[in-house]
Amino acid sequence: QKEVEQNSGPLSVPEGAIASLNCTYSDRGSQSFFWYRQYSGKSPELIMFIYSNGDKEDGRFTAQLNKASQYVSLLIRDSQPSDSATYLCAVKDNYGQNFVFGPGTRLSVLP
Amino acid sequence: ETGVTQTPRHLVMGMTNKKSLKCEQHLGHNAMYWYKQSAKKPLELMFVYSLEERVENNSVPSRFSPECPNSSHLFLHLHTLQPEDSALYLCASSPDSAGNTIYFGEGSWLTVV
């Protein structure tokens, strides 16, 4: 059974701080990794994806992937109250159509 | 506006009713998905269609019946549901069967009474 694990939170950080969200996965065959943001009562929206080991930066967001450790993280710099949401980690292999989602981490950015 | 439209947004139905959820994508994608999101549980994949052909069914009870008449439309037919089926049902699409990224609709909130 392929599993994706995340700390459910809530993770509380002050405005302007760096928020660090972590995700581990069980399937070593996973090739693609995604971070989605979901505001309360809304559908998930894609923030970014990463395929290769290392860091990938997009604005205030940085995704980090370590396939050897089966670990992917999302850093949010200069956190804003509008970043308060649940962040979902998803992984996918190259063979199926199935994205396996983690339970999500609830982030609260305090003004 | 994600390019994936779901109707109705909210649905309340009795356990003996028959209803359908509709999804339409305007992105030219070839793969479409139904996901279920319950409180405090991860998103659960229900069905995957690629080029109108069902390619994955994650052991979903037969009271949920999908239909994909073309690559732009996806339905989820509901009958004799249980209260535990109350959840947010999310439709999604992706460009092709490799499914590099998926785009979600706004979801249909279903309450079974």
Image: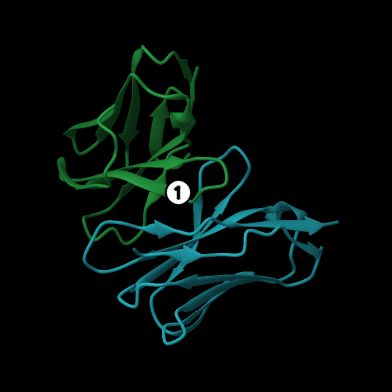
Chain colours: A cyan, B green
Q: Is residue A64 above or below residue B36?
A: below
Above or below — where is B20 with respect to A51? above
Judge whether residue A36 can be spotted in this image: yes
Q: Position of residue A7 (x, y in %)?
A: 61, 64
Q: Is residue A57 visible?
A: no
Identified by mark 1, the residue type is Leu
Q: Nearer the viewer, residue B87 or B25?
A: B87
The answer to which quarter of the image holds residue B91 is top left
Q: What residue is disc 1 on?
A: B43
* Residue beneath the point at 74% across and 56% down: A108
Q: Quadrant of residue B47?
A: top left
**B67 lies above or below B104:** above
Q: Residue at x 64, y 69 (%)?
A: A60
Seen at 40% across and 16% down, the residue is: B15
Residue B7, horizontal then vertical, whole percent:
41, 24
Relative placement, left or right, of B97 versus B110 is left
Q: Chain of mark 1?
A: B
Tell whether A24 sits left or right of A17: left
